[in-house]
Image (tube, rainbow, N blue to C red):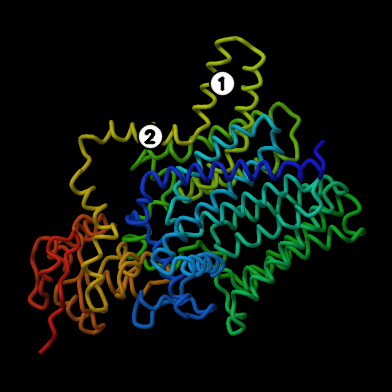
Amino acid sequence: MRTAKDGAATWKSDLMLALLAALFALAVNAWMGFSELADGGGDNDNLLRLVEVRDLLAGQGWFDLHQYRMGPEGGFVMHWSRLIDAPIAAIILAASALTGTVPLAEDIAQVLWPALLFCFTLFFTIRAVRIFAGESAMLPAIVVGGAAFHFLGIYSPAALDHHNAQLLLTMASLALLLEAPVHRTAALFSGLCAALTLAIGMETAPYVATIGVCVSLLFVVDGSGERETARDFGLGFAGVSALVFLATIPASAWGEAQCDAFSTVQFVVAAIAGVGLSAIASIDAASRSAQRRLLSLGLLAVALGVVAVVLFPQCLAAPYADLDPRLKELWLDHIDEAQSLFTLLAQDPSRVAARYATPAVALILMALRLGRGGWRRQDSLVGALLVVAFIVGVWQVRGTTFSVAFAVVPLSAWIAKWRTRAETSSSAGVALRLAAVWLVSVNPVWTGAAAATSVVLEKQTIPTEESGADEACEKKATFAPLGRMPATTVLVISNLGSPVLAYTGHRVFAGPYHRNVAGNLMALDAFLGSADEARRIAQAHHVGLVAVCRGNSESRMLAEKAPQGFLAGLMRGSVPDWLEPVAETQTSPIELYRVRQAG
């Protein structure tokens, strides 16, 4: 059995291995010229996060989450957490003090922040694999984990979105729980990580709930062995939730319930759950027997359910239940990461292998382990998270980011077992099986196979010029002419909203965010309606420029939706008399039209 001394003796070596892997990935990105810094790849979230950090550094209040340059006049309130803005802003401040230039400091932050998160995510993955499968699984963990995280893309340079931090914290919570029986403070820090990942964004609520349920059920089964783990996890979870609530929510908003961001709802539920679990584990009368522990935890679950139903019933609905039908049809249904497995099977089957293959193999391995008996505490934690992440991935492809990560643990153990067999056997069959196990376990192999299949299946239908034009719409250099023009309001599609904010000083109506309902509908009304309707909207809201990028997929989709509409007319070359082409931008992929002044 591992001891606390063993854990202290290995964490330095595990951190060094993770650091070396992170430096290797950083070297690969440097060799490629950090191309993501000049080409955001159309990732609105990464770009808007940079805008949000800039606003914070420019003096916008810590509690003020308005995005004033997007949406209708006055902007709208974003649902993101300052917990991500703060460290990125700190890196920019430190780098600008050293270099004397803010643009270079921003580039440094966009490289350093994802690289640090990559390093620590791999570190906690290695820790989880070490506890799950032993020393022999270290090499597979580095190779399989490092390759998976690198090719997921969420740790690439310029990846400022919060999903990478959430994956790090979730993996840390898992690894610390695996280590809890032999490390005195591991469960406390596991609860801390679980609370932080939930505070950053509600996407991880299923995984946080799964971890909490696992801690509770393990406590029911093994009261003496899991008592301290349950107590400390509950304290860490409730305590950090309270600190985050005080640090990120202004007193004026303590009574406001926000279902899509950390607020009174999440704090109350987290406090009751954490304090309740810790109290049950601490009170002998409630934890003396398995029956009492089960009854006490059942009552706690009922209390949580009553609180949710009575105080926050609005948060029990589907996440986008109240979204305007037009936005659902023309925006939400076209978000790649929000598509289901069944949609991918019908529309883009090649991506299924890249996103679902290794988690499916890992699930089979866990099922076989369960069938053979000898199910362990570690298996329960890893298996539960893997199953839940896979289910979330079936619902929305974004969940596969977590299932691919959790799959690294059983896959590394599988490779380690076959490596051991290969070391004691000279059989060619064993060597071939080992090679096959490696290939099946490395996620980029499936990604490459999927890409090759996609080329074979679609080579007759790929619109090469349109694909190139779509990419051109997203490059930083494309927005240079627009950035040189005096600041005004630009009428542009939602996919180009964040790039306009990041690369210029203008403001926009539309951006792909569910809280920006008024701004998105305003842009849709203008683009889908007639040229006269678009003119009325432009004049009423002081629009100075209209921007169109023909190659963008959203532009093509809206033009097909309303072939007689304003946007479709512009794409056919029909320019109404209230617009004039901006001559100096005629060679740019983005066509700019200046609104003529009335009268």
The outermost residue toward the top is: 427
Place residue 486 in its image quadrant: bottom left
Place residue 185 in its image quadrant: bottom right
Q: Which mark is residue 242?
A: none
* In-image side of 266 versus 134 (left or right): left
What's under tag 2, amino acid-wise? Answer: Ala
**Mark 1 neighbour class, 10 Å CA radius: few under 14, some 14 to 19, many 20 or more:** many
Mark 2–mark 1 CB contact (< 8 Å): no
Classify mark 1: helix, strand or loop. Answer: helix
Query: x, y (%) of residue 484?
Result: 23, 72
Observer-nearest residue: 329 or 49?
49
Residue placed under numbered mark 2 in the picture: 450
Q: Quadrant of the N terminus?
A: top right
**Mark 2 neighbour class, 10 Å CA radius: few under 14, some 14 to 19, many 20 or more:** some
Observer-nearest residue: 497 or 277?
497
Residue placed under numbered mark 1 in the picture: 434
Query: x, y (%) of residue 292?
Result: 87, 54
Place residue 303 in its image quadrant: bottom right
In the displayed structure, 523 sits above or below 340; it is below
Residue drawn where x is 40% and y is 66% of the image: 48
- Total marks in image: 2
Classify mark 2: helix, strand or loop. Answer: helix
Residue drawn where x is 69% and y is 33% of the image: 133
What's under tag 1, amino acid-wise? Answer: Leu
Q: Quadrant of the C terminus?
A: bottom left
In this rendering, which labeled residue sits more in front, label 2 or label 1? 1
Specify which label sits upstream in the sequence, 2 or 1. Answer: 1
